[in-house]
Image: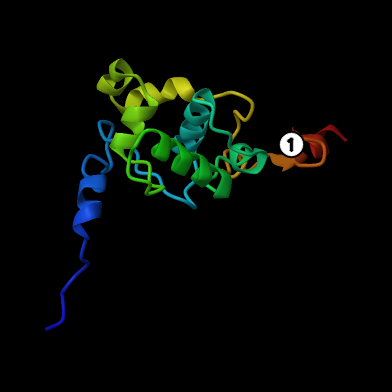
Amino acid sequence: EALKGPVTPPALTSIWRGCTAGPDKWPLLRPEDGGRAVHQLQNLLAIRGYHVDEDDGRYWYYGTMTSNAVFYFQAGEQLPETGIVDPSTWSALLSAEEFAIGPGVLEQYVGGEYSDDLAEDLNEDRVWLMGEERWSFPKLDKAAL
């Protein structure tokens, strides 16, 4: 008889507990993810001494180097080496006091060397010039001419 609907393996059920959407839920991060929570993760990993390369960091992307850092961190903390950042991984990255505050505590880990999310279209009026490493505002530049 065929199974109906998606089946969640028991090992992943515990990983996903506490990771649904909402302000009181920890972000569940995995390779190929991107955005603010990935940037916060990368900053926390850097504080703990786990290197994330320039490409992953600049684009707030959970790429190969971020994945490697998470695997090494999980191994060092004797966590299951899943590569998935779940509440147990967040708990190990943060102090007990910070983790007790909840996911809002991650906001203090925004910034650093790569404080702009270059992958996200924050403003359609600007363009990141990679070679010059600066923002350009084409509409404003044309108006000045």
Residue 39 position in % (x across, y down): 51, 34
In the picture, the quarter occupied by the N terminus is bottom left
133 to the left or right of 86: right
Which amino acid, mark 1?
Phe
Instruction: Name above or below for residue 31 compared with residue 66.
Output: below
Quarter of the rendering containing residue 93: top left
Q: Residue at x 37, y 33 (%)?
A: 77
Question: Hey, which quadrant is residue 145 in on the image?
Answer: top right
Mark 1, other Cα within 10 Å: few <14 / some 14–19 / many ≥20: few
Horizontal relation, residue 32 to residue 135: left or right: left
The residue that appears at 74% across and 36% down in the rendered structure is 137
Name the secondary structure under disc 1: loop
Q: Quadrant of residue 78?
A: top left
Residue 127, percent across and down? 71, 42
The residue drawn where x is 58% and y is 44% is 121
Can you give x and y, in whole percent of width and height, for residue 45 in the image?
49, 30
> How many marks can you see?
1
List the residue tagged with mark 1.
137
Most extreme residue toward the right, as rendered?
145
Instruction: Locate residue 117, reporting x and y percent.
Output: 58, 37
